[in-house]
Image (tube, grey):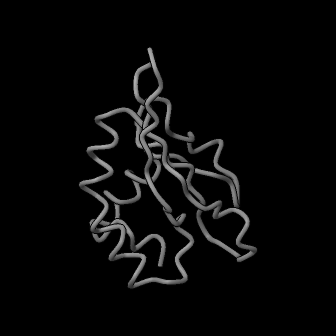
Amino acid sequence: MNNNELRVFKEALPEYVEHIRRNPNSLIARIYGVFTVIMEDLVPVHLLLMSNSAQVGKDYELCFDLKGSIINRKVPEHEIKPKGTLKDVNLLDMKKSRKNDPFLLFR
């Protein structure tokens, strides 16, 4: 993550934690920590450690590969497959069309 992504992550963290508490069976990946690696002569790098939700062995309706970006982050409608993986802009489009809690998609 870059510094801006880290800032956005920190802003969203309380809502994420509350969602996980309210929905313990949610397939949203569990975040274990955020770490900043500082090495001599290199720009610090922020790393996000999370679980792999794809290995939960449960049936699911929607799957997203979220990167926190909108650049090249949409699967075109003609390429969407059943049980396929969608991206950030697909989630934003669904959120707009439902006009409710964005996590409604995952309940």
Q: Is residue 53 above or below residue 77?
A: below
Query: Residue extending furthest top?
Result: 41
Quadrant where the N terminus is found in the figure: top left
**Position of residue 7 in the picture relative to residue 25 (left or right):** left
Q: Residue 5 location in percent, x, y?
A: 34, 40
Q: Is residue 107 above or below residue 16?
A: below
**Position of residue 30 in the picture relative to residue 3 (left or right):** right
Q: Residue 103 location in percent, x, y?
A: 39, 70
Which residue appears at 39% of the width and 74% of the height? 104
> How many numbered circles are shown?
0
Q: Quadrant of residue 62?
A: bottom right
Which residue appears at 44% of the width and 14% of the height? 41
Which residue appears at 29% of the width and 58% of the height? 12
Judging depth in this view, the residue of 39 and 45 nearest the camera is 39
Which residue appears at 32% of the width and 76% of the height? 18
Q: Residue 45 location in percent, x, y?
A: 44, 32
Judging depth in this view, the residue of 58 and 98 nearest the camera is 58
**Position of residue 86 in the picture relative to residue 43 (left or right):** right
Q: Residue 11 location in percent, x, y?
A: 24, 55
Q: Is residue 65 above or below residue 5?
A: below
